[in-house]
Image (spheres, rainbow, N blue to C red):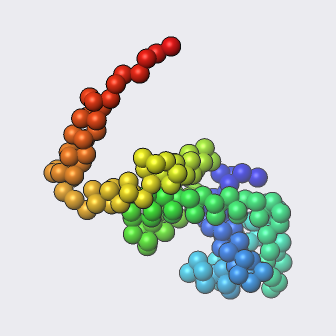
Amino acid sequence: METNELSESLQGYLEVIFELEELQKVARAKDIADRLQIQRGSVTGALKSLEEKGLINYQPYTFITLTETGKKVAEEIVHRHRVLKDFLLNVLQIDEPTAEATACRMEHVIDPKTVERLVCFIEYIHTCPRAGGEWLDSFARFCKSDPKHPGECTMCIKGIKSARKTQKPSKSR
């Protein structure tokens, strides 16, 4: 089953069940309701739907666990969430509460190819000698500066242009 076949709400339930299983091996309807900040009675319909789709093991008044398929779908949702939050927090320099809330909304609509491209970009930033921590720090300073007067960027651009002029052209084969 693909995550795009599930509503945003059902994806949220799977994510919560996954997190509860990691913490305490099983989930309970009460714990799910608490995490989602909803009434316990509202959980029952969603759990029945997830059980019908073969994503969870559920019987009323028992523990809830993910099936193998449910675990794979939940892992995909959690992966998207973590990648998005990491990108928002550590690359775009968004504050933690906003990054968390935004990642929660974005994770339900982003396609797998875009997620993997974000992963690739994050890896590039951390491994390329022209990027890295200094580059991210510079971006953070830029975000805090007046975008109409990016003095540091102007100096940097002049330095790059100057360096290009002094480089010898390479011979093509």
Is 9 left, or right, of 136 in this rendering? right
* Residue 118 visible in the displayed image: no
Q: 74 above or below 34?
A: above
Numbered circles on residues, count: 0
Locate residue 101, reporting x and y percent: 47, 68
Q: 60 above or below 49?
A: below
Q: Nearer the viewer, residue 43 or 109?
A: 109
The residue depicted at 69 percent of the width and 68 percent of the height is: 14
Q: 51 above or below 160?
A: below
Locate residue 153, reporting x and y percent: 24, 48
Q: Nearer the viewer, residue 57 or 150?
A: 150
The residue depicted at 65 percent of the width and 51 percent of the height is: 4
Is 156 left, or right, of 110 in this rendering? left
* Residue 4 visible in the displayed image: yes
Residue farthest along the left direction in this orientation: 149
For residue 69, which quarter of the picture? bottom right
Q: 115 above or below 16?
A: above
Locate residue 73, reporting x and y percent: 72, 59
The residue depicted at 46 percent of the width and 48 percent of the height is: 129
Q: Nearer the viewer, residue 116 or 172?
A: 172
Locate residue 77, reporting x and y percent: 64, 60
Is 11 left, or right, of 72 in this rendering? left
The residue depicted at 64 percent of the width and 77 percent of the height is: 42
